[in-house]
Image (cartoon, rainbow, N blue to C red):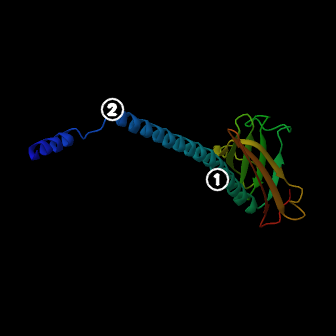
Amino acid sequence: MKLLKRMNKSNSRKNSGFTLVELVIVMAIMGILGLAVAGFIGTSTKQYKYASKDVDLQYEAQLTMNQIGDLIIEAQKGVKYEPATVAAPVEVASSDSKLIIYNKDCTYNIIYRPSEHKIYLRKDTLDPATGAVKADGQGKESLMAENVTGFTPDLSEAESKNSVGIVVDFKAGDKKYTSKQNFTMRNKVPA
């Protein structure tokens, strides 16, 4: 009898593995958990990309406004705006608008190209005797900002309050951002 009990115990230990039904149930539970985790990761990734676009657009707007502001604040001789409807010089297409900042020895041209959705910066050297752009003083354009859908300088208070307002609209995908800022010039300059 003792021998029979020992044999039943050893047989029950050998047959103590998982049944096919148990394995199928565990695999089904693992599959459901895996799908839930994958869905959570996918949703989180989409939200990150969406928020990241917004932050990138705001960063680009702030950087652009800081660069434009630095140039306006340091203006020495004047500030002038040439909207796209004004006939522009040959080197700039007539659809472009320009904000020109005059200093003693150079001008800074902030050029908005709506066809490219970009703002460029060009520094031109001036002839000290005549004040005109030197023949060899035409600067190379460098990219200031992308994703620009609007550029509107306001010079209405440039002479009275020594202030220039700038509004720049940005758009990337379905995200839009408008940056508005007023800059006070250090020097009293005519508009």
Q: How many marks?
A: 2
Residue 147 at what x, y percent from top left? Answer: 68, 41
Residue drawn at the location 71% of the way across and 57% of the way down: 71
Residue 79 lies in quadrant: bottom right
For mark 2, give the secondary structure: helix
- Labels 2 and 1 touching (C-beta < 8 A): no
Could you classify mark 1 by the number of other residues whose Cα lies within 10 Å: few (under 14), some (14-19), or many (20 or more)?
few
Instruction: Tell me if residue 80 can be seen.
Output: yes
Q: In this view, does 90 lie to the left or right of 24?
A: right
Q: In this view, does 67 lie above or below 98?
A: below
Q: Position of residue 16 (x, y in %)?
A: 24, 41
- Disc 2 target residue: 20
Image quadrant holding the C terminus, namely bottom right
Left or right: 118 as drawn, with respect to 150: left
User: In the rendered image, which quarter contains the N terminus?
Assistant: top left
Which labelled disc corresponds to residue 2? none
Q: Which of 147 and 142 is in front in this view?
A: 147
Q: Could you say where residue 165 lies in the image, as x and y percent from the top left? A: 82, 56
Which residue type does callout 1 highlight? Answer: Tyr
Query: Could you say whether the residue bearing mark 1 is in a helix, strand or loop?
Result: helix
- Distance from disc 2 to disc 1, alpha carbons, whole Å, reads 57 Å
- Please name whichever residue, 177 or 61, is drawn nearer the observer in this view of the structure: 177
Disc 1 marks which residue? 59
Residue kind at label 2, given as amino acid type: Leu
Q: Is residue 130 visible?
A: no
Pick the front one: 113 or 26: 26
Q: Residue at the spot x=21%, y=41% of the render?
A: 12
Q: Residue, x 49% and y 43% (percent of image)? A: 37
Query: Which quadrant of the structure image shows residue 180?
Result: bottom right
x 30%, y 38%: residue: 18
Q: Which of marks 2 and 1 is nearer the N terminus?
A: 2
